Amino acid sequence: MKTTALISALLVLPAAGCTVGPDYRPPITHAPAQWSDHHAGSITRRNDRLGEWWKLFHDAELDSLIQRALVANLDLRMAESRVRQARSQQGFAEADFWPTVNASGAYTRQKQSQNQPILGSLPNSSNIPFENDVYKAGFDASWEIDLFGGKRRALEAATAELAAMEYGRRGVLVTLLSEVARYYALTRGAQRQWAILQDQIEAQEETVKITRSRVDHGSAAELELQRALALLASVQSQAPIIETSIQSSIHRLGVLLAQSPDALNTELSATAAIPAPPPQVPVGLPSDLLLRRPDVLRAERLLAAETARIGQVKAELFPKFSLTGSAGLISISASDFFLPSSRTWSIGPTVQWRIFDAGRVLASINAQTEAQDQALLNYQKIILTSFEEVETALITYAKEQEHYQRLEQEVNANQRAVELASQRYAKGWTGYLDLLDAQRTLYISQDEWVRSKRAVTLNLVALYKALGGGWETKKP
């Protein structure tokens, strides 16, 4: 009866026990009421379309590349594997709540000493079988009672780490989406630069042809022809640079889709327009950012895990109570091995307590407390960085739009200037330097205009990434 009562008391202990260590409470964070007011009028506070932001560009090729990347990208697949690994580790923590049961069996041929203190002193010790067979089989079990919550804190930490891994996977997904869109925009931008370059080469070749004809007829000096040839060579020298840019972007897209670098050469060889930004860009409110950005959510879960580990370490200060037992069969004869007389069993509680360990547990508690402080500081830093990235992306996108509009006006004016200069030069009404200057200015402004148009799209992609858009996307 006493044994039964003691065992029953041990089984009730976890329900009545305490959980040592601090209980986690999410830190209070104050977000700005709204973003700064100096952004473009196309910015809207809605955030309902951030989940599939790339579809706002209305580019079928971009949609196709992203869908394939979601299936094949190696970084994303590794992140998913890390989530599965963390889920298994959480299973380890859950398993610690259950008893362990082991089964064993053995056969031994043994000989005991005839000179043992007790057996050797018996009168008829010579009749005792000192050499015999021993048959054993049985089970033993052990169950540690989580009286002070060390196991509960371990499970709490493992659960938080699993969530952190999931948010890490979302972060990889957000980065992947932005990288595919970024290199696709770089590819289309470089192709557009190539098209403008070809137009400039054709125009300059025509100018060389006209100038050579004027030199042959004595109406122009040889110096004008050499200047025309020099400008033609200068324009042509840009071709290898642009071709390299096109190929490197296509190669990067191929790797992002887990293919060989040249796998997309044929698919993306045809020139297409740079993806145009939508009339309105949804960004939501600053408070939405704390619920969207995977890195912010991941840092918060890591802080929760480090807080739980303090309790896990503190539990080592207290005694550990376990319920152990065993049951089996032991016999020196196989014929009576299964008889009731061969049965053996034991059951009872045990207690272990680290009474002296030279302060190792206290040092571990101090170290884990510092780890919690570091996690808190990291969480605060990531929040500030996220606000900074969004504000910077907003102003960069808005100002680049203004830059692009001014360059568009400049290109139109320079295009008209070249037309007039060409007409006047062909009729001999003006010198070659005027035409040369007009052509050079037009090419420079066109190249800057294309770069700015591409920059608008790239800045918008960076804004969507800073907002944490796209992690809701499911695999096709």
Image (cartoon, helix red, strand yellow):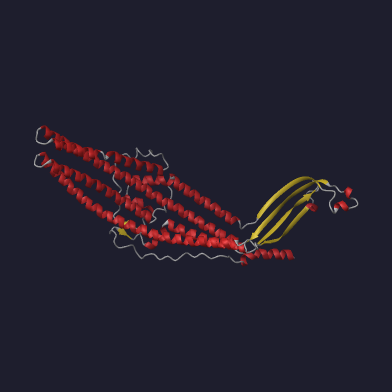
Q: Residue furthest top?
A: 216
Question: Residue 335: percent from the left, percent from the top?
Answer: 81, 46
Quadrant for residue 107, please give it.
top right
Q: Nearer the viewer, residue 147 or 319?
A: 319
The residue lying at 69 percent from left, 50 percent from top is 103
Q: Is residue 471 left or right of residue 413?
A: right
Which part of the image, by quadrant, shows the N terminus?
bottom right
Q: Residue furthest right?
A: 123
Q: Residue furthest front?
A: 358
Q: Give residue 102's position: percent from left, percent from top.
A: 68, 51
For the point 36% across and 54% down, the residue is 464
In this view of the protein, can residue 270 be seen by the observer?
A: no
Q: Is residue 81 visible?
A: yes
- Residue in the foreground of this view, choosing between 239 and 109: 239
| Residue 310 screen position, x and y as percent | 55, 62
Residue depicted at x 23% and y 39%? 234
Expressed as whole percent of the image width and height from the top left, the position of residue 180 reads 37, 47
Q: Total marks drawn? A: 0
343 to 243, vertically: above or below? below
**Which residue occupies 60% across, 66% down?**
18
